[in-house]
Image (cartoon, grey):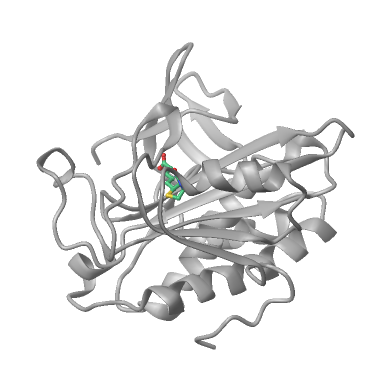
Amino acid sequence: SPWLTTRFIGRDLHYHELLESTNFSARVLAGTGTREGSVVVADAQSGGRGRMMRSWVSPGGVNLYFSLILRPRVPGIRVPQLTLLAAAAVHQALCSCVPEIASRIKWPNDIMVGEKKLCGVLCEMQSEPDMTHFVIIGIGINVNIGEFPDELRNIATSLFLESGRMVSRPELLASVLNHFESLYEAWLLHDDLGFVLPYLHEYSLVYRRQVIIRQTTGDVCGTVSGIARGGELMLDLDDARTVLISSGDCLLCRQ
Ligand code: BTN
């Protein structure tokens, strides 16, 4: 369906022509008690942010920048799993809206075409005084942007650059929200990501590949042997040990 068919995700939609960051606005809104599933969308961002304090290029009229507000009643330790859940939802939406491109999920939060980044997910959690927490899932998708700044040209791409055609932003947004709601409802019923692991493996960019995990504590090198039910990356080290990696930047080694 090209339209929104959800029960609650995206039923309250706050659209703005320009915001500093949809994650920032969603956080303010969530603090005022906005209901679960509310979505903040901006046509352009003046201070779009990525992980690790990086900026997210956010010109108007071409791409998608939006943030979901969730209030899952699960232990905070499970919340990072929502990053992979959102990435899976974006991937499923791309498969239905732009079937001619083959995108892959790069653990933990990117959608890639080849070695170039198409989409990023930024998941943030905040605890409230009553011990509950809310979660902001920010998603940026390079849709119809035709040209990137010099420094991004070799590492970023868009649906337009990959498919050679314009893709409808409202339709793609509706599709991401439709897919996300199904995955989120299943995730709330289960205790972990077990139910989407086959999907995450099938479309993983890093599965069975050699990677370097860059963490604040240093680099770890190994071969990815899977994604665990908790969303961690399973890494086979050179000394035959297997470790679970729960965060960090994942760099692909040359094949
Ligand atoms: C990353 O790859 O590091 C994550 C990028 C997330 C970008 C999106 S765009 C909508 C939302 N608002 C932001 O400021 N960031 C996220």
Report if residue 229 is visible in the image: no
Q: Pick out the residue farthest to the bottom.
A: 1
Where, by quadrant of the figure, is residue 200 drawn? bottom right
Q: Residue at x 44, y 22 (%)?
A: 238
Q: Pick out the residue farthest to the left.
A: 150
Q: Residue at x 53, y 41 (%)?
A: 24
How many marks on residues?
Answer: 0
Nearer-the-camera pick, 28 or 189: 28
In the rendered image, residue 251, in percent from the top left (x then y), is placed at 34, 33
Q: Residue at x 57, y 56 (%)?
A: 86
- Horizontally, residue 44 falls left or right of residue 130, namely left
In the rendered image, residue 45, in percent from the top left (x then y), is placed at 36, 49
In the rendered image, residue 120, in percent from the top left (x then y), is placed at 42, 48
Instruction: Name the image quarter holding the C terminus.
Output: top left
Q: Pick out the residue farthest to the right.
A: 130
Picture layout, residue 157 above or below residue 24: below
Q: Residue at x 18, y 42 (%)?
A: 152
Q: Quadrant of ligand 1?
A: top left
Instruction: Name the image quarter holding the N terminus.
Output: bottom right
In the rendered image, residue 29, in percent from the top left (x then y), is placed at 65, 48
Nearer-the-camera pick, 143 or 106: 143
Picture layout, residue 40 above or below residue 155: below
Picture layout, residue 21 above or below residue 167: above
Nearer-the-camera pick, 235 or 2: 2
Report if residue 250 is visible in the image: yes
- Horizontally, residue 238 falls left or right of residue 247, namely left
